[in-house]
Amino acid sequence: MPWPRKTDNRPFQTVELVFAGVIPIILIIIGTMGNFLCIFCILCRQRRRGRSTYIYFIFLFLSDTLSLYQWNLNYIIMEFNDRIQLSDQSLFLCRSIAFLSFYTLHLSALFLTLIAIDRTLILRSKFYRTHMTKRHHALIISIVIILLLFLLDGFLLSLGVRDERTDQIVCYQSFNTNIMFFYDKIYPWIHLVVMYITPFVIMTLGIVLIIIKLYNRRINLQSNHQKQRLCFMLIGMCAVYMMLTLPNRLCFSVFFSRISNQEYGDIILLGSNTLLYTRNATNVFFLYLGSSTFRKQLAKFYSCFHCSMPQCSNRIIPVQLFHCETKSDLS
């Protein structure tokens, strides 16, 4: 959420530089590389890329990557360019950033929620496991979610005006009073439901049901250890989502008026935003912990990179390193 930044003294500016400049650069690098490695890992497994859970994972990784850029890039430029924001350079950038700032967050939240629903039903419903986990079903559901959220957030593309008196661009504003009323009074509640209430309730319920099922003797067998690893990975992702997004919502919905009046208010608000977007860069760590195949593929990437160095130019690289495997170790 946007808010007017204050001009702080140097110690506070240094901390703000870290939260809004240095850490976002790290998140973009780690998140971009990690999310695309995750996508590549899924696409290289023939059985995996045809299952609903992994279709949703691909959309989650893509939306997380877009989410990292839309907020972090704007604030990186602002911190290193004398507080000049990218969104102030043109109406197109102003409206695009306003739209993507909510749209990508909503996509990430709902796709992670959808993964929790999918894995819970796979474990507990034979009908769903048999008939609803096909790739075409997952693609249809994903496209429907993308279109519905576009209809919900699309009005943000109209926010952003040019002040005729100063010839400056003012973001998150409109001359249409109905749009401004919807944005100021109604949309915050929609954002709260889509981004927080719905994911929190469904993820919590899904985590409880998954844990109960995992401790059931019928599934707690050695032959199903792959399913257990995937479920524990999902539990970790959902738990981290709730822990990292809750401070942001508390800061902007409950304590905003109190925090914004403090001298260090910008630091707290920037820190909560940084926590919020940190989740978008953590997928690779969960996949690394939850998938032995992903760890093996990373080892192969490292071998390929190491053998491409000049000192290894005469070595023969096994052809297996350049082929995608077809056997899945995760269900």
Image (cartoon, rainbow, N blue to C red):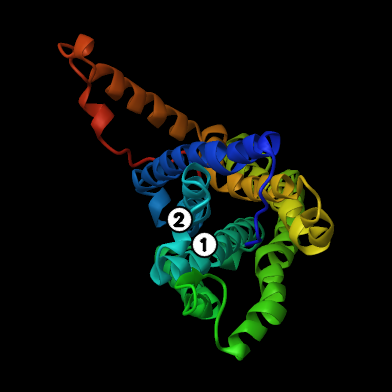
Q: What is the x, y in percent for residue 27?
A: 52, 40
Element class at badge 2 = helix
Say what secondary structure mark 1 lies in: helix
Look at 29% across and 23% down and name the residue there.
Answer: 305
Per the image, the residue denoted by label 1 is: 104
Name the one closer to the observer, 307 or 182: 182
136, above or below 264, in the image? below
Vertical comparison of 300 with 48: above or below: above
Distance (Cα) linking label 1 and label 2:
7 Å
Residue 142 seen by the camera:
no
Q: Is residue 96 left or right of residue 198?
A: left
- The percent coordinates of residue 73 (x first, y second) are 47, 50
Q: Nearer the viewer, residue 155 or 269?
A: 269
Residue in the image at 67% along x and 85% along y = 181
Q: Is residue 324 left or right of residue 130?
A: left
- Residue 235 as seen in the image, left or right of residue 201: left
| Kind of residue sitting beneath label 1 | Thr
Camera-side residue of 283 and 30? 30
Residue 184 image-quadrant placement: bottom right
Of the residues shown, which amino acid type is indicated by label 2? Leu
Question: Badge 2: how crowded within 10 Å, few (<14), some, or many (20+)?
Answer: many
Q: Which residue is mark 2?
A: 66
